[in-house]
Amino acid sequence: MAEKMLPVTRREFGLSLGALSAWLPAAAASPSSMPWAAPAQVKKIYLAVPVPSWPKPTLDVQQEKAEVEARLAELERKHPGLVSFTGGELVRTPEDAQACVKGLGDVDAVLIIDLTSGTGGMLKVLREIQQPTLLFSRPYSGWSYVDVTNWVQGGKRADLIVSSEYGDLDPYMRIFYTIHHLRRSKILVVGPSTQRGPAAEAFTNYYGTAIEYPGYQVVKAAYEAADAAQAAKAAEEFTRGALKVIEPSRQDIQSALRFYLAMVNLLKDQKANAITIDCLGGFRRGDLPAYPCVAWSKLNDAGFYGVCEADLLSTVSQLLLTSFTGKPGFVTDPVFDTSRNEIIHAHCVSATAMQGLGGPASPYILRSHMEDNKGVSMQVLVPIGDTVTVGKFLNPKKFVYSTGEVLGNVDYDRGCRTKFRTRVGDARKLLENFTGGLHRVVVYGDYTASLRQMSRLMGFELVKEG
């Protein structure tokens, strides 16, 4: 079979996510009530010396603070559900700053706003803040940026905005939410071992993410407890929504949907929002009752996370990218074609709402899992013409990324079921810089600038691969 590009018609792409997800259990359809989806708690701290000189001796500090408070309240309303600002103390001496540090409590991040010059002594104390810290300094307010620039250069989890435009704070609202999301998320890693490894310890220590290692028996028990009749009904709806069915049998599809229902219940029972399973090894050993590919696709469409191959690094990467962008991630096996300056992104698990959770759903074909021609996976025809960001944590303090343009879907009898070509800046350079294992996470949109801001505030090194 020759490789060919698959077009996506307007009618096919117009299939709504609402129609596709009508059968989703309530627990999967509404993750917003869960702790990982609550607004980030961000503590405000205002700095002003007792007797101002700069920006002017007659400055009314309380009025100045009130004006900023009103703008921040407007910003909070502009981004509902992302951030809840707390505090608002006016720090005027190093002693005030010391009390403020001790009284921070369990907040996700800190926003410092300077109102006057002369804040160096206070900032020397505030440098001890452990949470990610953002300085917002307006022209003619003061010189706090001198100190905070040194924080950033010294590797502290911090960033700064020196601007008259309050809109420059907009991207940080989602970054604050991402910080909270990682702190409150819980990942289940299912594989041969139930022991936490050093990578899990490192991510938990740095970002707060809970990571647990249940055994396959937990997955099997959840599958046995799932309602077979409900799965059969869901399978009918799911099949009707497909463009066509090629390999899977009716029983295969019912088993796939029963596994999905089981995973929804398992996540609910475990109070988790993400799961990744050693699926390939699990099948070879007979540890899995059904294929998870469809389950992972549906979880990703519903704002949860299903990731293949017990890949903790890709799972945390997807948590980061999805919580910031509001778009599902696609964990991919990149296929290089340097002769065409292209990368084909391929895997048997793809969400359908790649342009945004709750947005339009891409059409899909029901296929088998490619590597053994068993079970069910979805060949999703993703949107074309968009820029995508491709990234992955190599460890908690290093994130690699690249970008590309989606050229088209690929229909070919080699490689995983969902495949799409992307044009990149320099495929050869990207290949030479490629490191840290095979998988990468793709999200729609160019988030290069946002990743730079995020890396400073969250404290990881950002490395461009290509």
Image: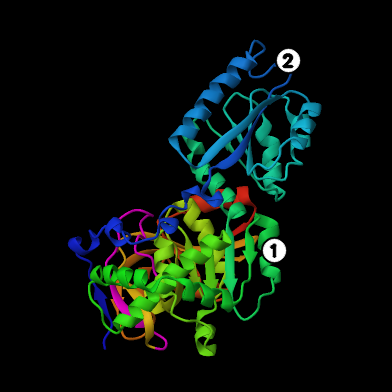
Magenta residues span 350-372
Left or right of 293 on screen, residue 47: right
Q: Is residue 54 above or below residue 358?
A: above
Residue occupying the point 39% across, 76% down: 256
Query: Percent position (x, y) of residue 339?
Result: 38, 79
| Tag 2: amino acid | Val
Q: Is residue 8 above or below residue 208?
A: below
Dot 2, how many residues are within 10 Å of its Cα: few (below 14), some (14-19), or many (20+)?
few
**Residue under label 2:** 51
Query: Percent position (x, y) of residue 362?
Result: 29, 64
Quarter of the rendering containing residue 382: bottom left
Which sits in the foreground, 179 or 192? 192
Q: How many marks?
A: 2
Magenta: predominant secondary structure element?
Answer: loop
Magenta run includes residue 320: no
**Residue under label 1:** 202
**Which is in the foreground here, disc 2 or disc 1?**
1
Q: Is residue 361 above or below residue 190?
A: above
* Lower sequence index among marks 2 and 1: 2
